[in-house]
Image: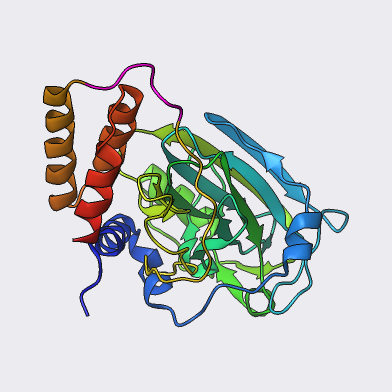
Amino acid sequence: MKKNLLSLCLSLSLLAMAPAGAYAAQTDTAVAPVISAQTLQTLSWTPLVPPVTQDVTLTASSAQINQGDIQGAVGAYALPADRGSLEITLTSIATGKTVYAPNVLVLDEQMRPAAYFPSSYFPYEKPGVVSSDRLEGTLKLTPALGQKQIYLLVYTTKQDLAETTQMSNPAKAYAAGVGNAVPDIPDPIARHLPTGTLSIKVRAEQKSGNIMIGQILDNVNGNNSAPAATPIVVGQQAAPARAEPAAPAKPAEPMLSDSETYFNDAIKKAVKAGDVDKALKLLDEAERLGSKTARKTFIQSVKH
């Protein structure tokens, strides 16, 4: 059975953006953790409105989840879903010889898991002029139309706590920086802890996002164009429940037929070319200008 175009585009875009050290995360057999709805509802979700950089210290007094494989302090964040694609850089800063190994679970507006980034997605980065030893990765997400916000849960696991990270000896970095011979000395090993220091940088971007978070709303037929997705480890999609569609604001006047044709043709071409993000932006602009057929055109193009 052929995968629909939307799933294919999302899979390809995710593979294209992954850093070399994160490829294992995309072929990992690991699955997203199962967290009870009650646990998610009791968390205090910190809003992050781009552009923003938030430094966070997770301590023993921070919110905790000890459920299934998850163990230790967690960070919970709410991001706007109506500002286009989001680029999120998550950094876990090493302190001495310890570091927090982050995993990220992304949830849609209905708090259903939509994407999963295991700790292998956040590889070790050597210290730089203004940066220290760290684990770091960048997430690129495209919230589906009709949502107000999505959620980001940062946590670590029992397996991560049993592992360590090999860092680079600062003496080696200094020697290489000044052009001296790199000394043959051992590199320090950082233990993984259930607490740590994070830095989260979020910005809205106009470039193509990598993973669709939530569902595309089909207001032509009064339901969603696709079922909700299971958590994505490699851009895979499949799914259980349906969410109530949120109707876009109705324009004051209908669009002229020539303009309808222009936008519909442009949407078809964008979908055919695999640029779903561009097609979504064209759809949004067309409906803002009064289009009555752009959404139906988009949904039919994606399904075929």
Is 253 positioned to the left or the right of 41 in the image?
left
Please name the residue shown 67% across and 73% down the image: 157
Hey, which residue is sitting farthest bottom in the picture?
A: 29
Instruction: Pinpoint residue 57: horizontal percent, then vertical percent.
Output: 75, 47
Observer-nearest of 94 and 187: 94
With 199 as the anchor, is 59 left or right in this view? Answer: right
Q: How far from the left and from the top, in percent, is residue 146?
A: 48, 41
Q: Quadrant of the N terminus?
A: bottom left
Q: Considering depth in this image, is 119 or 206 the residue closer to the camera? A: 206
- List the single residue furthest toward the top: 252
Main SS category, magenta section: loop
Q: Is residue 149 above or below residue 31?
A: above
Q: Is residue 224 visible?
A: yes
Q: Number of numbered discs present? A: 0
Is residue 247 located in the magenta-colored stretch of the structure? no
Q: Quadrant of the C terminus?
A: bottom left
Q: Which residues are magenta?
A: 249-255
Q: For this rendering, which residue is in front, 225 or 228?
A: 225
Is 14 above or below relative to 267? below
| Colouring rule applied to residues | rainbow
**Where, by quadrant of the figure, is residue 32 drawn?**
bottom right
Given residues 141 and 145, the one toward you in this image is 145
Q: Residue at x 54, y 56 (%)?
A: 243
Q: Residue at x 64, y 74 (%)?
A: 34
* Percent of width and height locating residue 98: 69, 62
